[in-house]
Image (cartoon, helix red, strand yellow):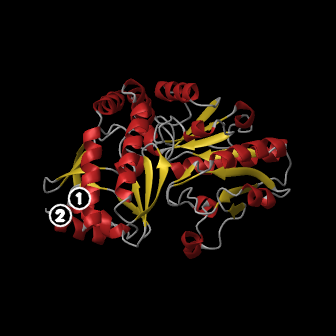
Amino acid sequence: MDFEDYVKKDSQFYMHTYARLPVLFVKGKGCTLWDIDGKSYLDFVSGLGVASIGHCHPVIVEAVKKQVEELMHVSNLFYTIPQVELAEKLIDVSFGDKCFFANSGAEANEGVVKLARKYSKTFLGEDKYEIITALRSFHGRTMKMLAATGQPEKQKPFEPMPIGFKHVPLNDLDVLKEAITDKTCAIMLEPIQGEGGVYPCGLEYLQGVRNFCNEEGLLLILDEVQTGIGRTGKMFAYEHYGIEPDIMSLAKGLGGGVPIGAIIARDEVAKAFEPGDHGSTFGGGPVACAAAFAALKVIEDEELVKNSYQMGNLIEEKLQELSKSFPIKDLRGKGLMIGIELEGEMAKEIVSKCLNEGLIINNIGKKIIRFLPPLCITEEDVNKAINIFKGALLN
């Protein structure tokens, strides 16, 4: 079958939930993807931040192969070695004391909200359940996380929304403080809003939120589903701000391409969960945990956090130079999480032109381009990507 045959079958059998680009990929290696016709593409989206160590990294492939041959699934009724090893590793590299494994970012965020509510109801008061999130935020597509997401246009088709969330503008500490009530139990933020347009929390703002939470006895939750695991030039984005959250969610880059989500929390908060409060049949399974443990090893051994920082700086330098001659309004982000806001509504057209030339980038709305390349990109990859991007701007 050729490309058109597969497109017809997709249209026939799959729900119309995605506005797909006209490419069918069949192979990936490192920072390169190949389509069904054999054309190669430089990947600067990495599966929306999932393939953060590159496609089909041999260490991940070997870890998954080995685990599949030994043990694939037993559920969380029993202990497994990969889960224990991954839990220990994540606690070692993060602020937290305890973790829990889920299957996705949305699922991890659901668990985060449950933990925050259980902790607050148990230790702070029965009526404390409300969580403050930011406008433009994105926390997932389940009903509860859609309610947490600060984008009314995404909520409208599915109203009424579950209660318990209030949305405020990002980077306005005074408005945030005014939104707090006796029912508030937590503040939940992305250090850098990803799907909302790559808008970072300001340094003084996030530090102020941390201090305010300390003063008011509120939990600070950081959604690091997209920013975590080296994406921003630090292992976790909270490190840029000199603070630590009480609870954090992870996913995307954690599994090296294999689906996994995680909740990390301070011991004082984590102890609110008791057997039966939360769980997952598939979460923390041996294969996913083996892949994630291997991914963390690759990130350390290949110094990919450092590379994320260095290549991010290089891309920023080159984009700053382009902005002198092309209609680039703003550059935002950290490390290899980069947002390019354009003067006009041309983002979708530029994505299409780059795709035709063998570069995969992503648009957020009509004016914003997002770069989320694998953390293993080289200077040669950066030069190639910028040249293709420049050509798209020229045309």
**Where is 105 relative to 273, above or below?**
below
Q: Nearer the viewer, residue 331 or 162?
A: 331
Crowdedness of circle 1 by 10 Å Cα count: few (<14), some, many (20+)?
A: some
* Quadrant of the image containing the C terminus: bottom left
Say what amino acid the circle numbered 2 marks.
Answer: Phe
Give the secondary structure at mark 1: loop
Say what amino acid the circle numbered 1 marks.
Answer: Leu
Residue 3 disc label? 2
Give the secondary structure at mark 2: helix
**Where is 206 relative to 244, above or below?**
below
Q: Position of residue 201 (x, y in %)?
A: 61, 50
What is the residue that sits farthest to the front in this orientation? 324
Q: Earlier in the sequence, mark 2 or mark 1?
A: 2
Q: Nearer the viewer, residue 391 or 303?
A: 391
Q: Position of residue 329 (x, y in %)?
A: 45, 63
Residue 24 disc label? 1
In contact (CB < 8 Å): disc 2 and disc 1? yes
Asked whether, in this view, residue 76 is left or right of residue 314, the answer is right
Q: Position of residue 76 (x, y in %)?
A: 55, 35
Q: Position of residue 354 (x, y in %)?
A: 26, 60
Q: Nearer the viewer, residue 145 or 323?
A: 323
Residue 24 quadrant: bottom left
